[in-house]
Image (cartoon, grey):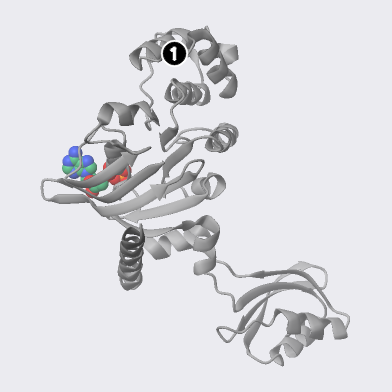
Amino acid sequence: MIEVKNLVKSYGDKLAVAGISFKAQDGEILGFLGPNGAGKSTTMNILTGYLSSTSGEAYINGHDILEDPIAAKKEIGYLPEFPPLYLDMTVKEYLYFVYELRGCTLPRNTHLKEICELVKIDNVYDRRINNLSKGYKQRVGLAQALVGNPNVLILDEPTVGLDPKQIIEIRTLIKKLGKNHTVILSSHILSEVQAVCDRIVVINQGKIVADDTADNLSRELTADHKLIARIDGPKDEVIKLVQTIPGVVSVVADLQRERGVWEYNIEAIEGTDIRRELNRRLMSRNWYILGLRSSELSLEDIFLKLTMGESVTEFLADKADDLEERYKEEGDNS
Ligand code: ADP
């Protein structure tokens, strides 16, 4: 488990991390998401013991990273954005080296073999790292993070620079690892955290602005009263009919999807759920709903809403206050 409490880091006058708190539980993959300059690397560097904090606490499986760094670091496998690979070494030489460096006491050959099978680099075990593709190099980076069986994995932008196939492979691997590790994965790519993470912490300008499941984050900002319906029926008559449903404010035929099938944007008064009535009325005319979804914001929209633009300054401040309140309450209750 990872626990961060009121972590602050200033570089001179620059406040890079402004009092953040969060927890990552065992077996959880936590996405740490924010634009460049948000404070992700600073936080990760503090968690891995590379940087000291200005104030606040960070615990890795109960070990204080500042007070007891050796015990804390033993629990951590770290994959920096640019893994520190020795390109002239073979994969085997490199992993032997990391094994020694970490003072690992597990049976060497069996342990390294298991890791290589897991991250699928056993076929390049005797190849020089320099001659490997970027995807393979990244997997060697992951392999070094796994030496010594650490419980906590900290992965900084793990798919940067990989091609789509390699991205899928690394994501699949991270998901697999997430089953028996605590994983923190930093990213500025929404689809990445959406695809891999159970929970997402969004950070902006050194402050946490959201801390929730990906689904909840979407839901929280979802416009339930705005629907996109794909309907098989005569367009003008469908519009007329839908307009008669109590609560409906507007109906617009947006796109023709197939012959006679249009996609309609339907907006109702906030708090009104018109789905059943929509169904009932269309059925009574033998017109069919072929698809129905609320016009949910994608995580991309949420991200923009959370982290950008004048209009969301207040929203951001409110979110940060809500979270502070929640952590205070949780702290009081624990
Ligand atoms: P991220 O990883 O989210 O891109 P960083 O943690 O690297 O963000 O940076 C957070 C802020 O701290 C940025 O404004 C960055 O310019 C500043 N910063 C990072 N490292 C240093 C440093 N060594 N000295 C001064 N400012 C720094």
Q: Nearer the viewer, residue 106 or 317?
A: 106
**Side of 184 relative to 311 (left or right):** right
Q: Say which quadrant the C terminus sits in.
A: bottom left
Please tell me in which quarter of the rendered image ligand 1 is found: top left
* Front residue of this view, candidates 18 and 190: 18
Which quadrant would the N terminus be assigned to in this image? Answer: top left
Q: With respect to residue 248, does 183 lie above or below?
A: above
> Which residue occupies 53% across, 38% down?
178
Any part of residue 206 in sight: no
Q: Which residue is mark 1?
A: 95
Q: For the residue carrying disc 1, how many other residues have a C-alpha within 10 Å: few (<14), some (14-19), or many (20+)? A: many
Three-letter residue code for mark 1: Leu
Query: Residue at point 57% right, 87% down?
Result: 269
Residue 97 picture location, percent across and down: 38, 10
Task: Tell me the quarter of the picture where residue 120 sits.
Answer: top right
* Observer-nearest of 57 and 79: 57
**Residue lying farthest to the left in this orientation:** 12
Q: Position of residue 70 (x, y in %)?
A: 28, 26
Percent position of residue 273, x then y: 65, 81
Which one is nearer the viewer's eye here, 305 or 186?
Answer: 186
The residue shown at (42%, 44%) is 187
Circle 1 sits in a helix, a strand or a loop, which is it?
helix
Look at the picture and state if 259 lies above or below 211.
Answer: below
